Amino acid sequence: MTEIRSGVVVVGCGIAGLAAAVSALQGGASVTILERAPREERGGQTRYTEAYLRMKSETEVTDDFEDQFAQNAGGYLDPSLVHLASEPRENWPAVLKTLGFAGPDVIAAFAEAAGPTIQWLKSFGVRFDFLPTQFLTKSQPRLLPVGGGLALVDALAAEAEKRGAHFVYETAATALIQDGAGKVLGVRAVSKEAAIQEFRANAVVLACGGFEGNPEMLSRYMGPRSIFLRPICRGGYYNKGEGVQMALDIGAAPCGDFGSYHAEPIDPRSGMAEPSVFIFSYGILVNQQGKRFTDEAPTTIDACYERITREIFNQTRGIAYAVLDARHTRIPNYRLGLRTDQPPIEGRTIGELASKLGIAPEALEATVAEYDRACRAAEFIPLTLDGLATQGVVPKKSNWAHPVDQPPFHAYPVISANVLTFGGLKIDRRARVLNQQGDPMPGLYAAGEVVGLYYKNYTGATSVLKGAVFGRFAGSDAAKRR
Ligand SMILES: Cc1cc2nc3c(=O)[nH]c(=O)nc-3n(C[C@H](O)[C@H](O)[C@H](O)COP(=O)(O)OP(=O)(O)OC[C@H]3O[C@@H](n4cnc5c(N)ncnc54)[C@H](O)[C@@H]3O)c2cc1C
């Protein structure tokens, strides 16, 4: 067995791992970064994202940031415990320290450090701007790094290389090494040649993503229907949940909604990264039985797509079809909301379209006729919420309820992608992994998707930021360990 020693071992080379590595290097530690993928695919999920950031400026998060997290901090949390969480953590009673929820102190630290972290990223040459997004209508601003997640990966990896980080590609961590006192001493890993290696360090940062690429864990936590989910891009297949699993194995506390994930509507026919279909607000969604099953436009698309995608996932075989008439092609820049590289399935009549979709024509014709009768004639104003709702049809459609009556008719198949899993590890505001009693585990840190913070609805555009912020915390704290 080969043994390699450094100050800090970082597992994973996405935004969380690279932020941890660079901040540990800045703190004076020697750093080894383990990465399952080959060098040319480094960057994990981060490599493929446009990286929307829930920020209203380069220095401040959006006004709703902490509220959104608070509303989605857990299930039906015990109010007698939650109100005690406003005290500093040192004063928490033992039982509160064991609670699996998004702690307000962790969220506050996240919000506070977001702006300074953007400034820190800028110091490596990354530029940020409010660029056009896939959302034709939106309720919150999104700041973007110019060049997306790949620009973050390239800039941070170059900085880490410049500062002498030791990258070990095609090597996957499998287990943590501890001494008799519980201190984490390093990780065991498996190389490309299937050889076992040990990487010893004063501290380990787990930054190796969620478990979207592990069918066994998906089935274990989300049930057999997870077969109808797939990672939103190739990077997700490398994330097999070892970071979460190896820490749970030594007594780390779980946090985040293990039975859930961030859902995004994609076209299953496409193999490109993020082949999204966000255009259904302007038509209807039907299942394989040709029936509508949800309000297609309860609000702006950025604020409702996740809930709607979960409804799509609940349909037979986890699939639905967005059915649109010619009206949608008149929306300025409508292709922004349709990233798939696959053409629409087209019909001159609804019956012809249904046949091409494998839906009984009379079923889809009846659904469209019933929906059309529930619509009122009105001007088509696609880029603002128009409040034009159906009348007398169930389910209701709340906005842009125009009839589907202008040929040619277009349809896109839509499934739910698994953008990221919610279940992970519990950390404190310094990114230290906590044990089941709520105490920091010596020498163990986590950042990015490995950290569980989301319950119910994903607080959109916060995962990259979470990786950057807690990765940076983890690296600087880990560098101080001797
Ligand atoms: C297409 C797409 C669009 C998205 N859009 C947004 C968005 O707009 N805004 C937003 O905030 N989030 C978005 N997300 C989510 C966000 O990009 C990710 O959640 C985030 O980048 C994850 O960062 P990470 O560092 O935790 O994990 P990753 O970037 O996935 O990095 C983890 C790394 O660990 C490696 N690894 C895994 N297991 C091991 C192991 N055992 N040993 C060694 N290495 C291992 C992987 O190969 C990978 O390189 C999107 C994701 C995708 C894919």
Image (cartoon, rainbow, N blue to C red):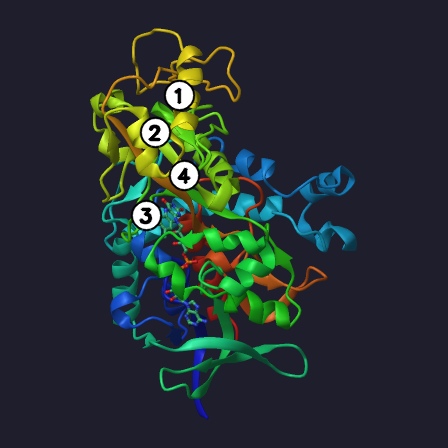
Alpha carbon of mark 2 to alpha carbon of mark 4: how far? 31 Å
Mark 3 highlights which residue? 274
Dot 4, how many residues are within 10 Å of its Cα: few (below 14), some (14-19), or many (20+)? many
Q: In terms of sequence position, does the residue under pointer 1 or pointer 4 come before the other?
A: 4
Q: Please report whichever mark, 3 or 4, sits nearer to the chain's N-terminal start.
A: 4
Which three-letter amino acid code belongs to the residue tagged 3?
Glu
Q: Residue at x 35, y 6 (%)?
A: 377
**CB under 8 Å between discs 2 and 1:** yes
Question: Going 44% across and 50% down the picture, which residue do you hit?
Answer: 418
The earlier-in-sequence mark between 3 and 2 is 3
What's the distance in space between the residues labelled 3 and 2, CA to CA?
20 Å
Horizontal placement of 42 versus 191: left or right?
left
Secondary element at image label 1: helix
- Specify which label sits upstream in the sequence, 2 or 1: 2
Q: Secondary structure at mark 2?
A: strand
Q: Which mark is residue 368?
A: 1
Q: Amino acid at mark 1?
A: Val
- Label 4: element kind: loop
Q: Residues within 10 Å of mark 2 (few under 14, many from 20)?
A: many
Residue 337 point in image, percent of width and height: 29, 34
Mark in the foreground, 2 or 1: 1
Query: Badges 3 and 4: C-beta atoms under 8 Å apart?
Result: no
Q: Please provide percent x and percent y for residue 447.
A: 48, 59
Q: Which residue is mark 2?
A: 323
Q: CA distance from mark 3 to mark 1?
A: 29 Å
Q: Earlier in the sequence, mark 2 or mark 4?
A: 4
How far apart are labels 3 and 4 at the CA level?
19 Å
Q: Report whether 252 appears left or right of 47.
A: right
- Assess mark 4: CB under 8 A from ligand 1? yes
Disc 3 CB within 8 Å of nearest ligand 1 atom? yes
Q: Earlier in the sequence, mark 3 or mark 1?
A: 3
Amino acid found under the numbered disc labelled 4: Arg
